Image: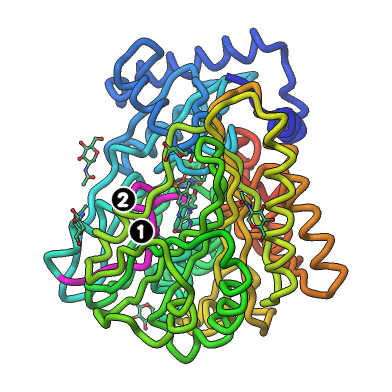
Amino acid sequence: MRFTPAAAATLLALAPEYTLAETSASSSADQCCAALSSSAIGDKVIYPGDAAYHTSVTSYWAVNVQLEPNCIVQPHSADDVSAAVQTLTTAGGENPCKFAVRSGGHMTWAGANNIETGVTIDLSLMNSTIYDKEAKVVSMLPGSRWEAVYKTLEEYDVVVPGGRTGPVGVGGFLLGGGNSFHAARVGLACDNIVNYEVVLASGRIVNANNATNVELFKALKGGSNNFGIVTKYDLKAIDNAHLWGGINVFDNSTTTQQIDALVNFIDNIENDPYASWIGLWQYNSTTGKTLISSPWDYTKPVAHPAAFDEFAEIPRISTTNRFATLYNLTSELQQAAGYRDVFLTSTYLNSALVLHKTIEILNQKISAAIPLARGKDWSIMVIIQPWPKIYWQRNQNNGVGNVLGLDRFDENMLQVLYDYSWDNAADDALFQRLCEEAMAELDAYAQSIGKYNEYIYLNYADVTQNPLRGYGDENVEFIRQVAARYDPEAVFQRQVPGGFKVSEA
Ligand SMILES: Cc1cc2nc3c(=O)[nH]c(=O)nc-3n(C[C@H](O)[C@H](O)[C@H](O)COP(=O)(O)OP(=O)(O)OC[C@H]3O[C@@H](n4cnc5c(N)ncnc54)[C@H](O)[C@@H]3O)c2cc1C
Ligand SMILES: *[C@@H]1O[C@H](CO)[C@@H](O)[C@H](O)[C@H]1NC(C)=O
Ligand SMILES: *[C@@H]1O[C@H](CO)[C@@H](O)[C@H](O)[C@H]1NC(C)=O
Ligand SMILES: *[C@@H]1O[C@H](CO)[C@@H](O)[C@H](O)[C@H]1NC(C)=O
Ligand SMILES: *[C@@H]1O[C@H](CO)[C@@H](O)[C@H](O)[C@H]1NC(C)=O
Ligand SMILES: *[C@@H]1O[C@H](CO)[C@@H](O)[C@H](O)[C@H]1NC(C)=O
């Protein structure tokens, strides 16, 4: 496997003091694996050739991020994670061990959640969910998938704000913010966390909540993997697992009507925060068609709520709207794994002009790709989502706040995610380039009409973007200070090169 040139450049820039010949980096990684194998958790270390290694590598959602580390360690507990970290921070000698941290493996750029020469700590086996009925708190381990969390909670008729696609991982999602069907009611998912259990670079296991390690508690709400490895998340539960919703499919020719309805919908979410809307414009090369798919979800069991009326007047090709549990709806809403993928995202003020430009650029890139793509099965898609101020103004998170920096904005916004998928590695450079161009062109247009916003949602961001910078200077400085305090040797900056690093923000 190869890094994209941009990812490789970032990794090298992160640790210039370690730019050794590849063979010496690789023999150092082998030493790190050997040290893990002879440690107390030696039976949890797997190597190329082991069936479990193959399963782990191929369980990443995007094929282009399925790197092959020298070994993988699969902890069963926070103590195991602590043992792994203690070994990896002491074993390397002259060449400190490089490692990666992975939960659900859904981030789409190579090296964010995996490593080619080094060790991957794969948290997949730490995947249980426990509900405390008295406290109304759900404890989830990082390797859980949202569909399993929702399934476990169904018998109690509660949910948590989580992923809208079943297989997405808990661990990464909650560290980047977390957009859910419930966001207008309870804010971003991270703002519903009441406690984190974290393994620090020293191997120490600590809790972070509004009474202990308060600064770490705040910094983890958006600050990603800059401080430690989270081994448990406790979230406030929301009553009622029963919703109404489904996927509505429309012809591409209804674009203008969708845009008109969406601009109104975004400005009215605060009047009915139960309603959630997503719009996907997707061109598929095998069908040669663009279709608009729109998940409508209402977080209480009420059919045809008025919030969707304007969209419902648009002629539809099909709908699956029904009463269903959150588990059922998120099992339906999937994007195929097994492709090569790139995501780029930006945030804009709510504006029909921006939305028209978003679709115009989408269509231009489809036309540009058709004569150039060598693969047979590819898709160019844009996912448009409301990003109204109620998402950060409704839930003040027990006064602690987060580091996303959204609280400095007082406008309803929208989020654009260009999401390209393809089957042929020969097209990597083509789709990466077209997707980057699309985002840059839309950003430039939005800037020219005063509708750009500098926030970039970390969970959808590409390696070529700098989401932490969009949190604002004060938050970047705060993240830096908390990282320095909890990780004084900068292990998570230097030895864990993957992800969005505050040292690079
Ligand atoms: C099909 C699909 C659907 C999606 N749906 C949604 C959605 O509905 N809402 C939404 O907000 N986002 C969504 N996303 C984006 C999603 O939030 C991110 O991909 C997120 O990173 C997924 O979490 P993960 O556990 O799979 O992360 P991974 O890819 O495993 O990790 C992501 C990053 O977090 C770090 N990390 C992971 N776990 C830990 C941990 N325990 N401790 C420290 N660092 C850790 C990793 O090192 C890595 O840098 C979706 C993505 C895809 C591909
Ligand atoms: C946890 O992971 C194991 C191994 O992949 C799997 O067999 C099990 O079903 C998972 N449990 C849950 C609750 O998802
Ligand atoms: C989709 O509609 C736009 C007009 O909004 C048009 O330019 C484009 O060609 C259409 N795409 C396809 C694949 O039919
Ligand atoms: C979801 O519900 C539909 C009917 O409403 C049913 O056909 C489908 O099997 C359910 N899916 C799951 C995963 O439960
Ligand atoms: C394109 O559509 C085909 C047929 O529905 C489907 O099998 C394939 O997964 C789609 N491709 C992408 C990249 O989404
Ligand atoms: C701190 O968190 C606890 C548990 O979630 C909550 O009950 C309490 O109200 C919070 N305290 C403050 C001061 O916000």
Given residues 48 and 423, the one toward you in this image is 423
Above-or-below relation of 461 to 236: above
Q: Are marks 2 and 1 in contact (CB under 8 Å)?
A: yes
State left or right for residue 43 relative to residue 394.
left
Q: Which residues are magenta?
A: 157-172
Q: Is mark 2 within 8 Å of ligand 1?
A: no
What residue appears at the point 46 percent right and 71 percent down from the top-left corner? 315
Q: Position of residue 346 (x, y in %)?
A: 68, 60
Residue 286, position in %: x, y? 51, 35
| Residue 161 included in the magenta stretch of the image | yes
Dot 2 or dot 1, earlier in sequence: 2
Query: Which label belongs to residue 141?
Result: 2
* Ligand 5 quadrant in view: top left
Indicate the secondary structure of the residue bearing disc 2: loop
Camera-nearest residue between 206 and 160 = 160
* One can see residue 39 in this view: no
Q: Considering the whole magenta stretch, tell me its main secondary structure.
A: loop
Residue 129 can be seen, yes or no: yes
Q: Which amino acid, mark 1?
A: Tyr
Quarter occupied by residue 452: bottom right
